[in-house]
Image (cartoon, rainbow, N blue to C red):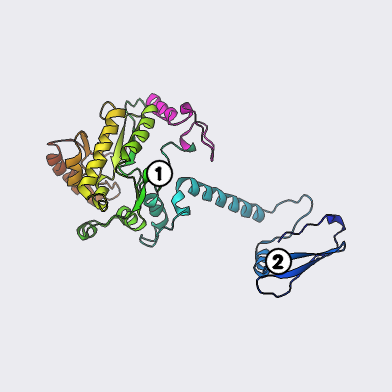
């Protein structure tokens, strides 16, 4: 409903009169100036909303009370939070995620991380020099390269690697990019009973954006060439064993793994001359047999520094894995914890 009043200063009274007619009614707008008709639909929801959210208007300057200021800050912060979610976890705005599959104290964070798909290969404002929220500078010198230069110069590091999953991110790549389509991994009963995993549970429930195997080289090459242009020396490619659960419709898990690893290693060879790749979560047979050039492989499971009971078995497991993996790759022990407090 739109009401136009030409002379608001002369307005003395305002009333909306509704006739009960199915599908809408004709109402009158009454004022001290004149009376005109407008077409209106059911006004009751609008009036209820007005009563619920309206506040009396204050004319002239007035000093905010502490309570009013806190309330205003609260709504401003809510706006910032929603904007951050929209930028970093866009999946929650275009598909409904399942939160009830996690422990109550981990539901929101875990779901956002493992159900989110990659939306672009370039850094957001947080990694840009003088970056501003909601704005991204296209100048390469203002992007990731300045972070890498600072890391190497200030901390005297020779190599900087970037993490990414073999499918792009935990939740893959957002559908529509590189012909990515939603897939729902199926985990075996043995894996589920041996090691229940929040990450896998999220991916099997909420799905993963799987890049078309015929297009995956283009995806890797674009990602890696951009990283190399920013002086990144290599990548740590994680979650490789997820390919075991995604073979349906692609000729089976073996064929899918072969296509992905062939494309991955071709991109590594083109963009990182020193064979800059560390394989991670890649002890599945398909991955080990399909990796022809990858030389470094993580030999450990996750390390839990605050769980002392796990430390001994962690070291033992890594040592045993090294005996096998060391025959054809360079094992990376990845994580450990010193006995000192330093």
> How many numbered marks appear?
2
Q: In x, y percent, where is residue 296?
A: 22, 35
- Left or right: 14 with respect to 324? right
Depicted 33 relative to depicted 69: above or below: below
Observer able to see residue 276: no
Depicted 27 relative to depicted 5: above or below: below
Q: In x, y percent, where is residue 253?
A: 22, 49
Q: What distance separates the C-alpha of mark 1 from that of mark 2?
A: 44 Å
Q: Residue at x 20, y 47 (%)?
A: 254
Q: Quadrant of residue 101?
A: bottom left
Pick whichever, 170 or 95, lies toward us. Answer: 95
Q: What residue does disc 1 label?
A: 177
Q: Residue at x 47, y 26 (%)?
A: 141
Quarter occupied by the N terminus? bottom right
- Left or right: 94 with respect to 32? left
Observer able to see residue 189: yes
Tag 1, which secondary structure? helix
Residue 139 colored in magenta in the image = yes
Quarter occupied by the C terminus? top left
- Left or right: 30 with respect to 236? right
Depicted 132 relative to depicted 116: above or below: above
Residue 171 colored in magenta in the image = no
Give the residues in magenta: 126-154
Q: In x, y percent, where is residue 118?
A: 40, 44
Res 40 label: 2
Cβ–Cβ below 8 Å for labels 1 and 2?
Answer: no
Q: Residue at x 52, y 34 (%)?
A: 131
């Amino acid at each position: 409903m739109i009401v136009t009043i030409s002379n608001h200063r002369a307005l003395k009274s305002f009333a909306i009169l509704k006739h009960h007619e199915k599908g809408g009614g004709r109402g009158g707008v009454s004022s001290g100036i004149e009376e005109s008709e407008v077409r209106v639909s059911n006004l009751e929801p609008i009036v209820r909303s007005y009563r619920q959210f309206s506040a009396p208007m204050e004319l002239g300057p007035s000093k905010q009370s502490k309570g009013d200021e806190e309330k205003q800050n609260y709504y401003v912060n809510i706006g910032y939070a929603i904007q951050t979610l929209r930028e970093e976890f866009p999946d929650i705005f275009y598909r409904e995620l399942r939160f009830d599959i996690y422990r109550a104290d981990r539901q929101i964070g875990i779901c956002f991380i493992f159900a989110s798909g990659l939306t672009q290969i370039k850094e957001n404002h947080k990694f840009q020099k003088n970056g501003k929220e909601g704005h991204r500078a296209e100048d390469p010198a203002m992007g990731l390269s300045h972070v890498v230069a600072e890391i190497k110069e200030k901390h005297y590091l020779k190599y900087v690697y970037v993490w990414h999953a073999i499918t792009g991110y935990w939740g893959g790549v957002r559908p529509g990019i590189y012909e990515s389509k939603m897939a729902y991994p199926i985990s075996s009963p043995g894996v589920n009973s041996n090691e229940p995993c929040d990450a896998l549970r999220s991916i099997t429930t909420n799905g993963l954006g799987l890049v078309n195997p015929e297009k995956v080289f283009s995806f890797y090459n674009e990602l890696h060439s951009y990283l190399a242009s920013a002086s990144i020396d290599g990548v740590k490619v994680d979650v490789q064993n997820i390919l075991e659960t995604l073979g349906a419709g692609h000729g089976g898990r073996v064929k899918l793994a072969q296509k992905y690893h062939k494309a991955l290693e071709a991109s590594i060879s083109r963009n990182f001359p020193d064979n800059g790749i560390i394989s991670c979560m890649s002890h599945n047979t398909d991955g080990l047999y399909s990796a022809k050039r990858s030389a470094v492989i993580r030999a450990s499971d996750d390390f839990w520094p605050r769980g002392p009971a796990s430390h001994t078995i962690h070291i033992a497991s890594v040592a045993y894995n090294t005996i096998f993996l060391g025959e054809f790759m360079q094992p990376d022990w990845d994580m450990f914890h010193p006995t000192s407090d330093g």
